[in-house]
Amino acid sequence: MNSGKATIHDISKALNIDSSTVSRALNNSPRVSSKTKAKILTKAAELGYQRNSLASNLRTNKTNTIGVIVPRISRSFFSSVISGIEETAYKNGYNVIICQSLEDVNREKKIMDNLLSNRVDGVLISISMQTSSYEHLKPFRNHGAPIVFYDRPCNFEGCTSVSIDDFEASFKATEHLISNGCKNIVHFGGPQNIALYKNRKKGYLAALEKYGLEINEIFCFENELSENDGVIMAKEILKMKNVDGIYAANDTSAISALQYLKSKDVKIPEDIAIVGFNNDPISSVIEPSLTTINQPDFEMGRMATNALIDQIKDTSLSVRPIVLKSELIVRSSSKVMP
Amino acid sequence: MNSGKATIHDISKALNIDSSTVSRALNNSPRVSSKTKAKILTKAAELGYQRNSLASNLRTNKTNTIGVIVPRISRSFFSSVISGIEETAYKNGYNVIICQSLEDVNREKKIMDNLLSNRVDGVLISISMQTSSYEHLKPFRNHGAPIVFYDRPCNFEGCTSVSIDDFEASFKATEHLISNGCKNIVHFGGPQNIALYKNRKKGYLAALEKYGLEINEIFCFENELSENDGVIMAKEILKMKNVDGIYAANDTSAISALQYLKSKDVKIPEDIAIVGFNNDPISSVIEPSLTTINQPDFEMGRMATNALIDQIKDTSLSVRPIVLKSELIVRSSSKVMP
DNA sequence: AATGAAAATACAATCGATTGTATTTATTAG
DNA sequence: CTAATAAATACAATCGATTGTATTTTCATT
């Protein structure tokens, strides 16, 4: 049929109407009479016209696009956050570009570069586990594009963070194990350069302290909490002999540890009770089902997006951290059934 | 510090060198002496210059970007496919825009429009369950941008599809149930406007026929195979009394049915054996573990991306479907333990 | 030192849409 | 019917980078 490369100039020529009028008509400007608008829209459809956003965005210096950086989309928690982000973004006329850092800081850097050169209007980011410096975020601020952190809060210039109170959630989780009789609780912790994991560890330690339990550095693991890490830590625990509780900073590691321990005939929760974090779908399916912390994932995506859009619209907006509620879901892995 | 809005013209003025030379220097063209290149790169860094891809892409009429449409990123199968896509794309210098249709054809349309107006160089798509017409894909072909289907193959003009042999996989799955003694096997099927689900049903029917089992239309369910659908179908099955096998076209529905049946004290696999499709992570964790079909997800993403990039580079390329191998993973839900 | 080729750089148009200003056309009032 | 105003449309510059062509500079050669 047609070459499919129609521009406003093609419409302009075909109708002998100036391209500025065509542009205004396509944007439904009141400066164009409804008669000419109709003519132009008809011709546009006829030629299969499709606006060229590149040109438009270049001229207006706005892309109506939000960049989202997520460590890994396959994590259930993150994909729910993304759903919340997309819903809110689309509702406000923004498009979303989703990028995975895969917990790799170099990849994160490249992504930031790319989003910047594509001139996204703002960025939602959950930093990678490797990220300890924020240098690569600065060019963004210099361009005046706002950044909002979600899930993993960051103390970076005037940027908002949207997260739960990790200290408190962690404290509750540990307290729960203690009140169920655990005396020797290990902690599966994440990289301590990430405030989130630092706060989770602090909450764990605070609970031990409150209940007068001994704090043992050897009980504090620190790694990326992958499935494999879970198995490695489970093996270590078996060597320790006296461990009777695990508080893991994510479900991934808690679940693989649980499976490993079960395969070694460790009774859960009788011998070792386990609490995870995130409420992954698997946590409710595995046997015994896993006690864990549920976060308002979808809501977190919505809040973060709203905060970002507010800042895009008014860059002078002052910002403060947004803290959402989390809840402890008690299941079989931490509770002796009656 | 600086305003962060540096363009090649700012560099050009600062050094009194024409912007065309600056552009060439930044692109490492041999037409610029290494001495000037050095000066320009230094000044660029100093000014915090960041290329404006909008301008560049507008001029060159190329975005080096691939659009990916996925029904739902939270499905493990799809997030693995995406990993394969990203790896291959980045390796070849392409960026990736990931979009979720959420199985909604209207959303799919909007996404296609958006990708087109952003002039992506090509699209990888797994159509939504609601998609039955390909009208909304045509503008793309008219613009000369290639489309490659993955997972859910489509017969659309000169477009490649990358998938497994769904008929064969389905046949094997059903045959497996039959050889384990099942006589009354129901099928959890997806929308029949999708070739993938049609082929899975055909494979199921073919196996029944080969082994002389009665084909019963009431045994063939058809819906979107959600978690909820799984429960609804499980309830129906209990009413039927005589069902002794389920072959589900995805794990999601198989798993929720399994859980429901278990809660009703149905013995699996003794009373009812179950086979799913996709090898979701949960399938190996649930008890009894679920027999399922594993697809080469990551590989599928890689193959589809390579095919797309080949076509972007040479639009005249003739195309043919790419079929990958799948495998039946036998677990406890279909096999009586010795 | 003059010549010519090669190397380096400058000029200018272009991609497609937007937008402030100017001009034309239509409408209303006196 | 004309002047004044409003409505509709046209003109032209612009966003930032790219690229074919033209011009200048450099350098080797005679």
Image (spheres, coloured by chain):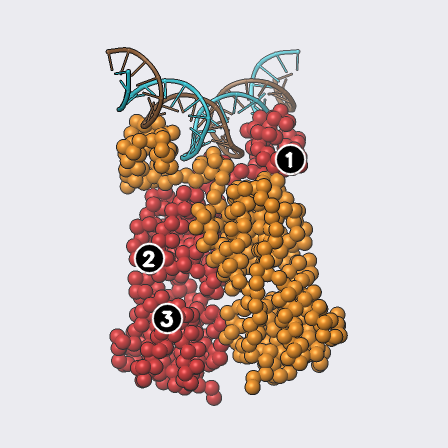
Chain colours: A red, B orange, C brown, D cyan
Residue corresponding to mark 1: A2
Q: Is residue A123 above or below residue B62?
A: below
Q: Residue at x 29, y 34 (%)?
A: B34
Q: Secondary structure at mark 3?
A: helix
Q: Callout 3 environment at 10 Å: few (<14), some (14 to 19), or many (20+)?
A: many
Q: Amino acid at mark 1?
A: Asn
Residue corresponding to mark 3: A229
Can see residue A170?
no
Q: Please indicate whether residue B129 sits to the left or right of residue A276 in the image.
A: right
Q: Amino acid at mark 2?
A: Thr
Q: Callout 1 environment at 10 Å: few (<14), some (14 to 19), or many (20+)?
A: few
Q: Secondary structure at mark 2?
A: loop
Residue A129 at x, y = what percent?
35, 61
Q: Residue at x 36, y 51 (%)?
A: A109
Q: Please indicate whether residue D2 sits to the left or right of residue B46 in the image.
A: right
Q: Amino acid at mark 3?
A: Asp
Q: What chain is tagged by disc 3?
A: A
